[in-house]
Amino acid sequence: MATMAPHSTAAAEQLTGTAPIELIGLTHDYGSRLALDHLSFRVNRGEIFGLLGPNGSGKTTLFRILSTLMVPSSGTARILGFDAAREPNRVREKIGIVFQARSVDIKLTVGENLKHQGHLYGLSGARLKKRIHEVLERVALLDRINDNVEELSGGMQRRVELAKGLIHSPEVLLLDEPSTGLDPGARRDLWLYLRMLRDEEGVSVLVTTHLMEEAEHCDRLAILSTGQLVALGAPFDLKSEIGGDMVTFEAASPAQAAELAARMRERFLVDPTVLGTSVRLEREEGHRFVTQVVEAFPGFVESISVAKPSLEDVFIQRTGHRFWTEAQSE
């Protein structure tokens, strides 16, 4: 749910040029495939920003560039004013990273994992001990400080990962598919902690995800498709742009769906989208329109659904295809 924080500092960032994350024409070409195609947008201070897209959309490539693990083919990615490609060490001082793959040592205790991570950032002694207690209290794991990580549940291990990313008090936190492998309860807890970081410490959080329900928790989203930015804004605002109801008619075959769409265009002067056996369109008072279609074209409709617009509807409207029809690798 959006807060006032992202909007209150936006004007100042326009003047100072120190937005937590700023992309300017960012492009990456693997030779056989263009992974990122001239992306340009900003992440505001104190907001949770989501990168939403299916596999192959470019979000993993973008995450690697922001993490200073890759250099883009062209364009610029700045974090707090520092160029991720030209000033990687300065960027690494400012960011915390939680990768999708596990990065904790399960044979060490929770405290030992954080101690070694702190040493990498020059922390030691009483200062490091104090910070370990602070971050473990933040993620509700202080009572498990002496437990081996392998003894913890998957959700708790993910919280240790989060604590590692926070040990050096970063201003920007990057998380790659953070809820992978978590049960619903652990997923809710994770988002609770992220909102606390945003609201109480002003940390700017960027999350990559392919889960629509997870994207709904973000203050703003960049929706990616085959390396291109297809939508940018708050989830509610993006869905509101569609308006009306999303009506879906299921036909018995793709051929029947195409025929139904053609007849609807001619009879009702609408422009539906055909996706396999589905015919979709946005319509005010969709339940009334459903009755008109069924009466006009008996035998064509196998089933019907009427729903408020979703983020997947935004994706389909902007791209003309379903969320999961793209290549399955990045």
Image (cartoon, rainbow, N blue to C red):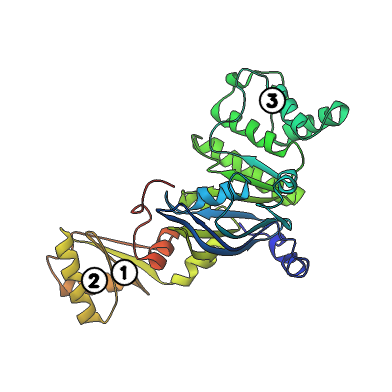
Residue type, label 2: Thr
Q: CA distance from mark 1 to mark 2?
A: 7 Å
Q: Which residue is mark 2?
A: 291
Q: Residue at x 65, y 45 (%)?
A: 194
Question: Mark 1 packing: few (<14 Cα in 10 Å), some, or many (20+)?
Answer: some
Q: Mark 1 touching mark 3, by CB under 8 A?
A: no
Furthest toward the left, the residue is 299
Q: CA distance from mark 1 to mark 3?
A: 56 Å
Observer-nearest of 187 and 173: 173
Compare marks 1 and 3 and give the one earlier in the sequence: 3
Counting from the top left corner in percent of width and height, residue 178 is at 55, 41
Under circle 1, the secondary element is: helix
Observer-nearest of 245 and 47: 47
Q: Which residue is mark 1?
A: 287
Q: The N terminus appears in which quarter of the rendering?
A: bottom right
Q: Residue at x 69, y 52 (%)?
A: 86
Q: CA distance from mark 2 to mark 3?
A: 62 Å
Residue type, label 3: Asn
Q: Which mark is residue 113?
A: 3
Q: Mark 1 touching mark 2, by CB under 8 A?
A: yes
Where is 171 relative to 131, above or below?
below
Q: Residue at x 42, y 58 (%)?
A: 226
